Image (tube, helix red, strand yellow):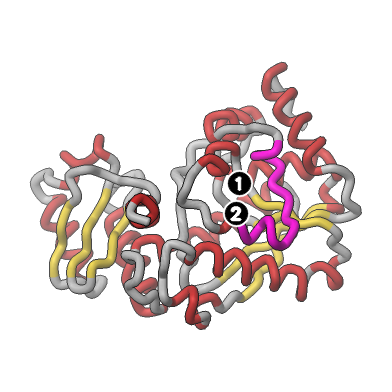
Amino acid sequence: MSTLSEAAASWASRVAVAIGEPARLAVAFSGGVDSTVLLALAVRQLGVGRVLAVLAVSPSLAQSERESAGRSAASLGVPVIELLTHEVDDPAYRANGPDRCFHCKSALFAQIEAEVRSQYGVDAVAYGENADDARRLDRPGAQAATDHHVLRPLAAAGLTKTMVRELARQLGLAVADKPAAPCLASRIPHFTPVTAEKLAQIERAEAAVRSLGFSDVRVRHHGEVARVEVPQAELSLALAPGVRDRLVSAVRRAGFAYVALDLAGLTSGAFTLAALRHD
């Protein structure tokens, strides 16, 4: 078991208090740094036999993220329950308003209650909202967690994203520096319908761009136009001789007619924050 600094040990202790002593805890797991740290701390608190990870699998989850999540859980010895979710079939989700994440999370938590609680002896569910998330306007999924009495131990313990990443490093987790990976539907402008075909198109385009050496990417779906966001520090790479042509060809092969590079760089929550500001 990793030895933590005094500060990190204090953070972990606060999370342990927020987790409590459930007989068995299910963690709504994505494989990102927040849910992986939560999973690791739950194992430290409860023991591996009292924790399981629940991964929602649907067209909005990239295959690379599914595989990465499996590796992260396996490194902690925690079994992964893959739930095939069907949020794309829900008209409210498909309509893609700023509350899209509410419908997704609500369906997931309801499915966990229906299919996981009794079958696996789970008496508490938690997810990886951190204290920074709790202060953001573009997190409608938080209301779903409240409605379904889902624990958010990182936020309850006051852990910011910076603190979570530092804990991940001290715990020796491979995801400590992993970029955020929101669901593929976040690349589609609000009130433009979400479809499985668009999600697959985005997944293909982002995988192709990432293969060119970019650390992170969002391909925003504007019909025939792909608006490519990469970190500001990597904009010059996108325009480098040879790379630009390969990037354009790769995105076009994914099904887009036109490729635009966003000079503002990668922006998290771009569509939802803009929509909420206009409410």
Give residue 167's position: percent from left, percent from top.
Answer: 63, 30
Q: Where does the N terminus fall, quadrant-wise?
A: top right
Q: Which of pointers 1 and 2 lies earlier in the amino acid sequence?
A: 1
Q: Quadrant of residue 38?
A: top right
Q: Quadrant of residue 144?
A: bottom right
Whether residues under marks 1 and 2 lie with C-beta atoms below 8 angstroms apart, the answer is yes
Q: Which residue is mark 1?
A: 129
**The disc labelled 1 sits on which kind of residue?**
Glu
Q: Where does the C terminus fall, quadrant-wise?
A: bottom left
Q: Residue at x 51, y 52 (%)?
A: 139
Give residue 147's position: percent from left, percent from top.
Answer: 69, 61
Query: Is residue 151 rendered magenta in the image?
Result: yes
Q: Residue at x 27, y 47 (%)?
A: 230
Q: Which residue is mark 2?
A: 142
Magenta residues, dominant SS class: helix
Q: Secondary structure at mark 2?
A: helix
Write down the region rendered in magenta.
143-156
Is 39 situated above or below 143? above
Residue farthest toward the top in the current orientation of the protein = 6
Give residue 121's position: percent from left, percent from top.
Answer: 88, 65
